[in-house]
Amino acid sequence: MSIAPVPRIAIIVVAAGSGTRLSAGAPKAFVGIDRHTMLRHALAGVFAATRAQVIVVAPAGREGDALTEVREAAGDRIDEASVVVGGSTRQESVAAGLRAVWPDVEIVLVHDAARALTPAALFDRVLGALDAGASGVVPVLPVVDTIKRVDGEMVVEGVDRAELAAAQTPQGFRRDVLETAYRVADQDFTDDAALVAAAGHPVVTVAGDPAAFKITTPDDLERARALLGDDAVVPPARSRSQSASARVGVGTDVHAFGGEGELWLAGLSWPGEPALAGHSDGDAVAHAIVDALLAAAGLGDIGTHFGTDRPEYVGAHAAAFLERTRALLNAAGFDVGNVSVQIQSARPKLAPRRAEAEAALSAALGGAPVAVSATTTDGLGFAGRGEGVAATAVALIYPI
Ligand code: CTP
Ligand code: MG
């Protein structure tokens, strides 16, 4: 078996900003343009460009979500991709990415995840200029507006726009040049070309691409949505009775009694009942459903996406797991048809709260019907003896 050589290029994708100006209720890179996030679109361009080490710089606490996006975009190149946590400024985030660059890498490209629709050709153009001998490259677009220098409300003077250009990313550098410039930087720059120029290195321009515009405001997001056009719009969900290409999956889970706090089961809290033990809330019903849904879509199992290395799922309840699972399914082109789940346990008594449990689980799955049944197993086995809870789920999903 031959082993592919280590790439000589690294692409740092900075995605750690909060998106204050977009104000969409989530860190900007995780805001959806269509059914895919900005980060996922940006990564599609990155992975369609040349082979490279890919480093995604994510906001603290969102590393797991970033990794999910990277996995989906990287396919079998996942070994060449990684996620690191960013800082409070773009410059700190790039610096964090730089620290993760592999030793053999000679060329580093830095790209804003917010330039989500950047075509792969722009990466190639920047790399072409580096190959031709440049040590720093920035893609630019001509400025089309007439520019004024102003002081408050007063115009001070006109500025010749022929002397100006609007900088985009990806910006590319010889690794040694970029690393040195970062080491000596003593102020905050808004892009890497400015930081490298301030360190005394020449930076050349190549033609930018209008599609590489930065999504900053809600208007920009609308523009991105319009550019993606009808192909990007999620097709209307098929009726749930249409089962032509439906797929099924099965999942089971078991948790022992003996956890801290109160019992969480089937998406509900059960005051007065002993708690189940587990990394999250031990809700075996929710976890069995997650496994059944992921299995149906061929997306692995609960450990693949919600492993114990994911701090955000410590103590998490059913809704967090199920909503994330449905998002993963949607990203893979599926939605939930219906779910049937059966609990084996001596307690609690389900029947009085069955409708409530079904409604809670269904709501977390976008309204797909969920049926919950229960058996005491006639007092047999660990479940019958009241040592723990077992749940088995079957899920039907359909392509969207
Ligand atoms: N960025 C980053 N870390 C930061 C700030 C910004 O990785 N601390 C990234 C953003 O995720 C984005 C790129 O740098 O991909 C360009 O920044 P910008 O468009 O300003 O994004 P935000 O800082 O998220 O937006 P805002 O300034 O509106 O808060
Ligand atoms: Mg910013």
Image (cartoon, rainbow, N blue to C red):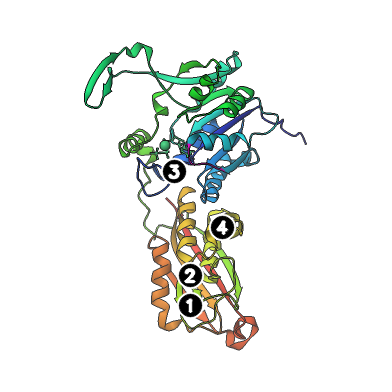
Proximity of marks 1 and 2: CB atoms separated by less than 8 Å: yes
| Magenta stretch bounds | 85-89
Residue 356, horizontal then vertical, whole percent: 39, 75
Q: Which amino acid type is shown beneath numbered disc 4?
A: Pro
Tell whether label 2 touches label 3 (CB within 8 Å): no
Q: Nearer the viewer, mark 3 or mark 2?
A: 3
Measure the alpha-carbon separation of dots 3 and 4: 22 Å
Quadrant in the picture for the N terminus:
top right
Q: Is residue 294 visible?
A: no
How much space separates mark 1 and mark 3, taking CA atoms?
A: 36 Å
Number of numbered callouts drawn: 4
Q: Say which label, 2 or 4, has the lower sequence index.
A: 4
Judge whether 326 appears above or below 22 on screen. below
**Helix, strand or loop status at disc 1:** strand
Q: Main secondary structure of the magenta part?
A: loop
Q: Kindly identify the residue that appears in the image at 51 percent across and 67 percent down.
A: 286
| Disc ID at residue 340 | 2
Residue 40 or 235: which is nearer the viewer?
40
Element at label 4:
helix
Q: Which residue is mark 4?
A: 311
Measuring from the top left, give residue 157's x and y in whole percent.
26, 15
Which residue has dot 1 on it? 373
Which residue is labeled 3 in the image? 37
The mark that comes first in sequence, 1 or 3, is 3
Residue 276: which quarter of the image?
bottom right
In this rendering, the label closer to the viewer, 1 or 4: 4
Callout 1 amino acid: Ser
